[in-house]
Image: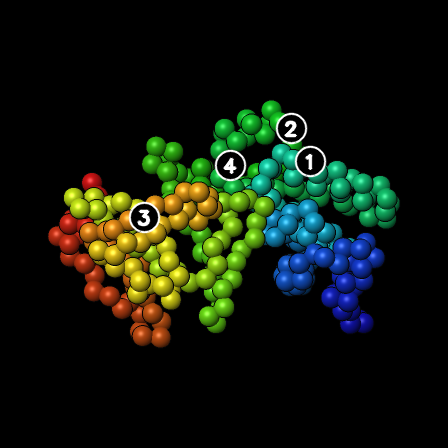
Amino acid sequence: GKDVSLLERALHYRSQFQWDSTNDGELAAFLAYAVSFPDSFLCLIDTYDTLRSGLRNFIVVSLVLHDLGHMPRGIRLDSGDLSYLSLTVHRIFLQFATDHPDRSFFKDLDIVASNDINEEVLHSLNKQGHAITVFGIGTNLVTCQAQPALGCVYKLVEIDSKPRMKMSQDFEKVLIPGRKVAYRLFGEKGWPLLDLLVRQEEKDDIKAGKRILCRHPFIEQKRVAVVAKKVVELHALVFDGDAGGVVIEEPTLEETKQVRNMYY
């Protein structure tokens, strides 16, 4: 058949609805996802701005897919106020279907919610009201809350020596840009006082016996000057693919015990 430019069609719809301020990288990712999974198109929309970027980019790509005979599946929310966002997304979908009768599929799209869903969250959502159709429950389904799991997320902070920053509507998920070094500062009696993050180029300034002004990353009024008896760098390069893999000597059991006893 005739070749179709998904990008041109998506940009046409984005311009038609005057949504030109949506994130271009996110739109590109949605288009790539649509090419790979045209009949199971379900997008995470809270990467940048849930309602003003993610949802709008999802809508324009869904329209392109529908033009080509495919049916989108829905969206996923993984942060923010799940009650408010799900209800707002549902309302926008219904309104869009009403305004565009030939796009009635918007009424049937799924709204999936994830992000540490547990019984307490479910009860809270039911009390508040929501429009969620599918819950993605992972961690709290397969782990015991008496021994909870450690959630780890990889965040990109620098590319080619240029700092990068993740933006989010959840304040605690906003990153401090740039490569950093973490230190633990110890007092006179050997107890840890605080942990300190500094930029890579500032690491030579962090020394024992030197007065160090430590600031809270988000609360300007919280600061303290510390003269540490000992300074320990917390991060070490463990694996380097270019160097053949593991690049440190594995500590002995006794060395591991000594580190543990330092804090407990």
**Within 10 angstroms of label 3, few (less than 14), some, or many (20 or more) residues?**
few
Helix, strand or loop for disc 2: loop
Residue beneath label 1, please?
Answer: 87
Give the percent coordinates (x, y) of residue 63.
77, 55
- The answer to the question of whether label 1 and label 4 lie on touching residues, with beta carbons closer than 8 A, is no
Residue 142 higher or lower than 232, as above or below:
above
| Mark 3 or 4, nearer chain start | 4
Q: Which of 84 and 210 is in front in this view?
A: 210
The residue wearing badge 3 is 225
Label 1, label 3: how many angstroms apart (C-alpha)?
47 Å
Q: Which amino acid does label 2 sit on?
A: Gly
Task: Indicate which disc residue 222 carries.
Answer: none
Distance from label 4 to label 2 (Cα)? 15 Å
Which quarter of the figure has residue 86?
top right
Q: Mark 4 points at which residue?
A: 117
Q: Tell which residue pokes out farthest to the top in this image.
A: 127
Amino acid on which disc 1 is placed: Leu
Q: How crowded is mark 1: few (under 14 residues within 10 Å), some or many (20 or more)?
A: some
Query: Given the image, on which type of amino acid does mark 3 rest?
Result: Ala
Residue at the spot of label 2: 129
Q: Is mark 4 on a helix, strand or loop?
A: loop
